Amino acid sequence: MMVARWSIDAKFGYKQNVIDLMQRWLREIGPQAGFKADGMRLVTGSIGAPESTIQIDYLVKDLAELNQAWEKLATVAAHKQWGKDMEPHVVSGTNRWEIYRVL
């Protein structure tokens, strides 16, 4: 098992906007690409982490499963629009994926 973590930082004063958009992605867009709701969780920085950071953790069997979801996500038109809706609220260049192995 692996945890795929997608992270982005909100601009000052826009954290709730980003959280709202991320929650919408979890409900409406992720499932269209095969991201299973019961394998995802939304977290934000609290202590020892930037409060502006918002992350989605996704539990996957292996990299092949994650790659399949990424490939499908690229075909979801709503994801493209979601990215455009998200852009004004986030710090450019802060989005990233990190992959962790579950022990």
Image: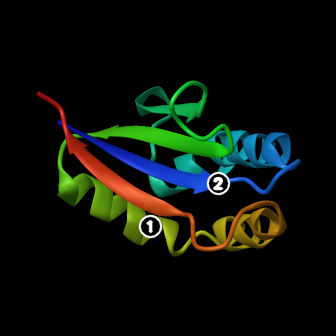
Of residues 12 and 22, the one nearer the viewer is 12
The C terminus appears in which quarter of the rendering? top left
Q: Is residue 19 above or below residue 66?
A: above
User: Residue visible at 83% across and 68% down?
Assistant: 88
Task: Say few, some or many: other residues with alpha carbon within 10 Å of mark 2 (under 14 / 14 to 19 / 20 or more).
Answer: many
Give coordinates of residue 47: x percent, y percent: 56, 24
Give coordinates of residue 80: x percent, y percent: 68, 73
Residue named by callout 1 = 72
Q: Amino acid at mark 1?
A: Lys
**Count of labels in the image:** 2
Secondary structure at badge 1 equals helix
User: Residue visible at 39% across and 71% down?
Assistant: 71
Give coordinates of residue 44: x percent, y percent: 61, 34
Horizontal side of residue 40 vs 16, given as left or right: left
Q: Amino acid at mark 2?
A: Asp
Task: Say few, some or many: other residues with alpha carbon within 10 Å of mark 1 (under 14 / 14 to 19 / 20 or more).
Answer: some
Give coordinates of residue 92: x percent, y percent: 66, 72
Question: What scheme was used to colour the molecule?
Answer: rainbow
Horizontal side of residue 20 vs 8, given as left or right: right
Q: Residue furthest front?
A: 48
Which dot, 2 or 1, sits closer to the camera? Answer: 2
User: Residue visible at 70% across and 39% down?
Assistant: 23
Q: Is residue 51 above or below residue 4?
A: above
Residue named by callout 2 = 9
Secondary structure at badge 2 equals strand
User: Residue visible at 45% across and 46% down?
Assistant: 35
